[in-house]
Amino acid sequence: MSTLDADLDATARPVTDDGHEVTRAREAVVGSLPVRRLLPLRLRRSVGAWCFIDHYGPASVDGVAGMDVPPHPHIGLQTVTWLLAGNVLHTDSLGSEQLIRPGQLNLMTAGRGIAHAEVSPADHDPLLHGIQLWVALPDASRHAEPAFEHHADLPTARIGGLAATVLVGSLAGQRSPATAFSPIVGAELSAARDHDGELPVEPSFEHVLFVTGGRARAAGTTLAPGSLLYLPAGPDRVPLTAPAGTTLMLLGGEPLGEPLLMWWNFVARTPAEIQAAASDWRAGRFGAVAGYAGEPLAAPALDPGRLIARARRG
Ligand code: MN
């Protein structure tokens, strides 16, 4: 959550290692949970339509509240929740209530507007490890009706020593049932045994690859948690070495080609849209999230001048 301009680390410049772009996560805190924020970058706001990547844990949440993200609004995006360990309860203004566990996908389409909360349930597992992703909706779909999907049975494929689970889009001939509004892919790659080979990718997509557990070598670069490797469109395969037990995420898509204006939990195109969404949230027009014991999140102070300057920069 939160994409205020000040959060974007000016030092997060791409560094090249064997000619590839590798960036380091910024440390951020969501609720009381430290996260590695891998996207957006100042110089790269989106990869395909993926515009936000947080990776948190593994963290002990034994005997503490754990995840506690109070009700907050979204517009213009989909949120993707994926766990490697633990459990999280999602509730939203449509009335959805869904517990998620590792291997399952929670996909919320904000469209013109939705509010949700994500918390560790009262009797939660002692360990929490997961990722939170946003997909920007393309202009033609960004005012769509809000919706929520839970997928407990996602397609899997074997690629050498890797077990791939396809969250969104398709990989290695397997297609996810999750609703996508632009050509994208999201997949977890888990090394069931040592893998030393190639990963097939869609050549018209740009991609990022990051490790959620262990260490891997990809495209000549060593990846550990907190590193993000960017792979431009063109090649149809990526050299990848991953020892047994390593877990990675592959995210990609056709370059979106639309300038995004991101502020707090909103993905829009113009400052006026952001200001309208912030004022709608303050006025309670996103609808209530039932079952959360506490106050919703307040929107931060909005500086219209700064927003306009950022929109001009594109
Ligand atoms: Mn959210």
Image (tube, rainbow, N blue to C red):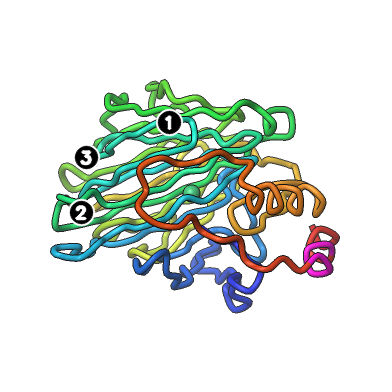
Crowd around label 3: few <14 · some 14–19 · many ≥20 (10 Å): some
Q: In the rendering, which numbered label is found on residue 243?
A: 2
Quarter-wise, where is residue 171 in the image? Answer: top left
CB-based contact (under 8 Å), mark 2 and mark 3: no
Task: Tell me residue 36's x, y (percent).
Answer: 41, 65
Task: Name the residue located 54 percent from the left edge and 28 percent from the top edge.
Answer: 180
Q: Label 1, on which residue? A: 95
Q: Identify the image quadrant of the C terminus.
A: bottom right
Report, in whole angstroms, how far the alpha carbon at label 1 lies from the one at label 3.
Answer: 41 Å
Report, in whole angstroms, how far the alpha carbon at label 2 lies from the one at label 1.
Answer: 42 Å
Task: Name the residue located 45 percent from the left edge and 38 percent from the top edge.
Answer: 92
Amino acid type for the residue under numbered disc 1: Gly
Going by the image, does 86 lie left or right of 198? left
Q: Is residue 227 magenta?
A: no
Q: Is residue 45 above or below residue 268?
A: below
Residue 156 vs residue 151, the one in the foreground: 151
Task: Name the residue located 37 percent from the left edge and 48 percent from the top edge.
Answer: 292
Task: Tell me residue 170's x, y (percent).
Answer: 44, 26
Q: In the rendering, which numbered label is found on residue 161?
A: 3
The magenta stretch is 304-308
